[in-house]
Image (cartoon, rainbow, N blue to C red):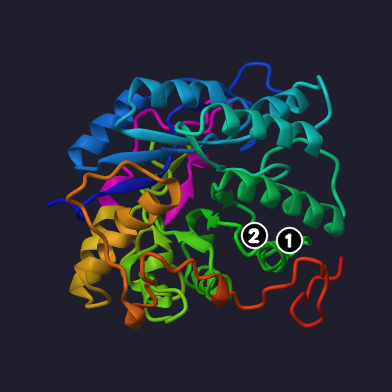
Amino acid sequence: MRLGRFVVDGHIHAGKKDSAKAGSRTTGTFSEVESYDNSDQILYDMDAYDIQIGILLPSFTGTTNEMYGSIVKHHPSRFRTCAVDTQTRLNAQRGIKAWNLNDALKELDDVLSREPDIFVGIGENCPGSMGVLRERPTRMERYKELCATAELAVAHDVPMFFHEFNSFCMDEPFTMLGNVCSKYPDFKVIIAHGGGYKAYEIEKTCCLAEYHEHIYLETGYWKAEYYEYALKNYHVTARKLIWGGGDTGSRLWYPQATMPGAKLVESQGRVYNNRNNWRGTQREAEYQPDFYGWSTHQIHRLKDLELCTQDEINLIVGGNAAKLYKLPVPPAVTFCSGRPDLNIPYKDDDRKDKQAFPWPEDIDFIPDTQPFYG
């Protein structure tokens, strides 16, 4: 049975191998990888689980906007893709030119301007974030980088993925993101993986989404019980959730076996890095892990747990992504709207007046609304 009326996988990797490329300057998770089209395997799984459209996400250095754009052009009814400053990152990785924000933003601006019907967002990694070889920025420098990226995203009216949610980080990424979203109330952000797969991680991101109207949470790694943090928070609800397989197409991660009886750690649905199979540069699993089996099961369980209705599920598994990415939706398909009881606005409500701490355009700092001081 299909998950909903119109189903979108919001997190797919279709243009890379996960083994480190020969000659990569770095080793480990952030090695340079080989650009590779594995969309045929992904389309097979999408058909097997009856998923209509997938959002592709360039990620590790070595993936290219050109490859991802080519996949969309070959399958225009099945895919759209986000963009990353892939060449700027690759130049830094290979020692050709140090990474800098101006080059990164120009690369993104060119891609988003040239093919807006193909490239519909920024991510999985925003400029200067996960995996790029660069000089360490100060917190204020990083804040200004995110502000500049927000301006670009707003100008193109596209969402940006945010993959900086490590709790043990000097940059305080969520505090920083909250300040950027207050400064740019039209800035649309999708927190990759919803901040993680553990209860405390998910609760934290739901608190952040509560205060900012355009922060969305991707839920592919969430077990059903944890959806309650969002669904029962009146300021979040189903309209800020975007479902996906988690990391569809990746061979670096895989769904971990359940751990029945566990009390202090996650009992099921954990996702581990495939380190136990790394042999030199051979990091990837020898088969394509099935990301849909577990993540689709969690959506079905939402009804068993009586956490939400099918109307809400239709938003989670397709409606929210269709709106954010301006996806082609069959005329007969409608999604829940005009439901104040679920914090789901009417179609013509832009929600600007619902921002928690909007700042006047000519003011850069208001104490207490901006806990980040640099």
Residue behind mark 2: 166
Numbered disc 1: secondary structure? loop
The quarter of the rendered structure image containing the C terminus is bottom right
Please provide percent x and percent y for residue 263.
40, 76
User: Which one is in front, 342 or 292?
Assistant: 342
Which quarter of the figure has residue 170? bottom right
Q: Could you tell me if the residues under marks 2 and 1 are in contact, i.e. CB atoms within 8 Å?
A: yes
Q: Residues within 10 Å of mark 2 (few under 14, many from 20)?
A: some
Against 40, is 274 above or below?
Answer: below
Q: Work out how far the residue at label 2 is from the one at label 1, CA to CA, in angstroms.
A: 6 Å
Q: Which mark is residue 169?
A: 1
Q: Residue at x 34, y 28 (%)?
A: 76
Instruction: Determine the residue positioned at 31% across, 24% down.
Output: 40
Is residue 275 located in the magenta-colored stretch of the structure?
A: yes
The number of numbered discs placed on residues in the rendered structure image is: 2
* Residue type at tag 1: Cys
**Residues in magenta, as a range:** 270-294
Does the image show residue 354? yes
Q: Amino acid at mark 2?
A: Asn
